[in-house]
Amino acid sequence: MAELTRDQKQFRRMTESPVCPLVMKLALPTTVSMLVTGIYNTADTYFVSQLGKSQSAAVSVVFSLMAIIQAIGFTLGMGSGSIISRALGAKDKDTAGQALSTSFFSAVGIGALITALGLIFLEPIMNLLGSTPTALPYAKVYARYILCGAPIMMGTYVLNNLWRWEGKAVFSMIGIGLGGVLNICLDPLFINVLGLGVSGAAMATLLSQSISFVLLLVPVLKKKNISKLSLSLFSKKKDFHLNIWFTGLPSLLRQGLASISTICLNKVAGDIAQDSALSAMGIFGKVFMLIFCFLLGIGQGYQPVLGYNFGAKRWDRVKTAFLFTYVFGTAIMLVFGVILYIFAPALMPLFIDDAEAISIGTRALRFEALVMPLLTVNVMCNMTFQSMGQRLKASFLSSLRQGLFFSPCVFILPAIWGLTGVELIFPASDILTFLTSLPFAIHFLFALKKKIEAKDTEAE
């Protein structure tokens, strides 16, 4: 019997090895990658917040800009990644290579355009993102470096998703993880030792993103992956581009709406309590995302397993992967919810020395801790339908938490309850999102049951 090729071994691993251990093996490196990313975002907030409220508020403002860049990069990365995993499950390497090449070069080109336009219209953009007059000078300084790194950042998101969707999450962990560790080390060096302040934090972020980009790109150039990267494979067909964008649309909606919601929240919080509320909710966002990284990492370990087996029509394995990931993700969020509720008062003083900001942030974190176990349903449904190419369902579900429900909450709740309303915005959105997503999960499981029964009948 001829020895299996590397690609054949990977196919058998993804479609035949035990599902639960496979999800965990892929979830571990993706969770580490997400966690390190969350930590170095939080590191920026931590070290900059030591400089003052206005500097901390500036980072919160520019975080919205970074989220927009991330949204476009993730749209291309997730859209092409879903196509890649299903294509590899169907043993179609040509489509996989075309998806990678088209998304990567599109990301770099769009990133360059964002750099040019962002630097030209820098101050109006910062004002649009919700900067206060006192935070504006620092926001402009921080944003210049972030804008210069837009092509690199967007290319990094595509490459990160390539490795993850091919089922080789270790490469993703190495690239993203080492870049993140470097950023954590450079923050205190640039900000405190060299006295570069806000500029130092931005420089550390840009340098770490560049290192991640190189670490993720070099193995692709050395052909360590399955999908081929080549400018000649860049698609000239409009339909192929649209397929990538529409498949990645849930990520664009999720990240883009997150940016819009942050802008709206910044404006509402700034109007109520100025820099104290702006800083508190910015820190809240970073702490929450740090915990949410665990759920996202688990879900992203599940996605390539689903994509491969959906392409190979292994419905039994799809069902097992879904149920295991849902139960495990819910248990993780329950544990973190309890921990966050207990330790929220001790967390906020680590980031800022302002009594009002600490009080606001503590209450917001405790409210969110109460609903954390509910988050898994929407994340699982969203990732499942995106992985299967069911774009309308995935897009609708991704627009719930920080779009369809967040927007009314951000304007209604503060108008009714003032500052307490600001603190309740996220948990209220989460409860409404859970109630809307649950029927989709139940329907999906019933549909899978029918597919499994039909396949068993055919086998007989």
Image (cartoon, rainbow, N blue to C red):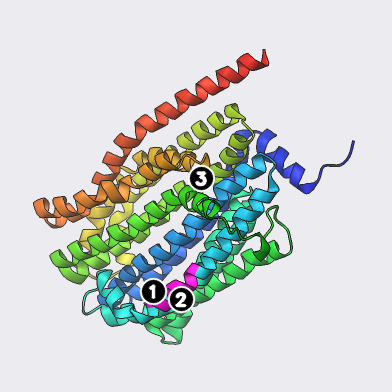
In this view, the residue in front, 288 or 202, is 202
How far is disc 2 from disc 3 in space, using C-alphas? 28 Å
The x, y position of residue 447, in whole percent, is 48, 25
The three-letter code of the residue at mark 1 reads Phe
Q: Which residue is mark 2?
A: 187
- 231 part of magenta stretch: no
- For residue 292, side relative to residue 354 (left or right): right
How far is disc 2 from disc 1 in space, using C-alphas? 7 Å
Viewer can see residue 184: no
The image's mark for residue 47 is 1
In this view, the residue in front, 47 or 10, is 10
- Up/down of 244 relative to 175, above or below: above
Q: Residue at x 67, y 16 (%)?
A: 459
Q: Residue at x 21, y 60 (%)?
A: 360
Viewer can see residue 392: yes
Q: Main secondary structure of the magenta part?
A: helix
Sequence-wise, the earlier of marks 2 and 3 is 2
In this view, the residue in front, 303 or 46, is 303
Sequence-wise, the earlier of marks 2 and 1 is 1
How far is disc 3 from disc 1 in space, using C-alphas? 29 Å
Q: Which residue is mark 3?
A: 298
Q: Which element carries disc 3, helix, strand or loop? A: helix
Asked if disc 2 and disc 1 are in contact, CB closer than 8 Å, the reply is yes
Q: Which element carries disc 1, helix, strand or loop? A: helix
- Up/down of 131 relative to 285, above or below: below
Q: What segment carries the magenta color?
A: 110-118
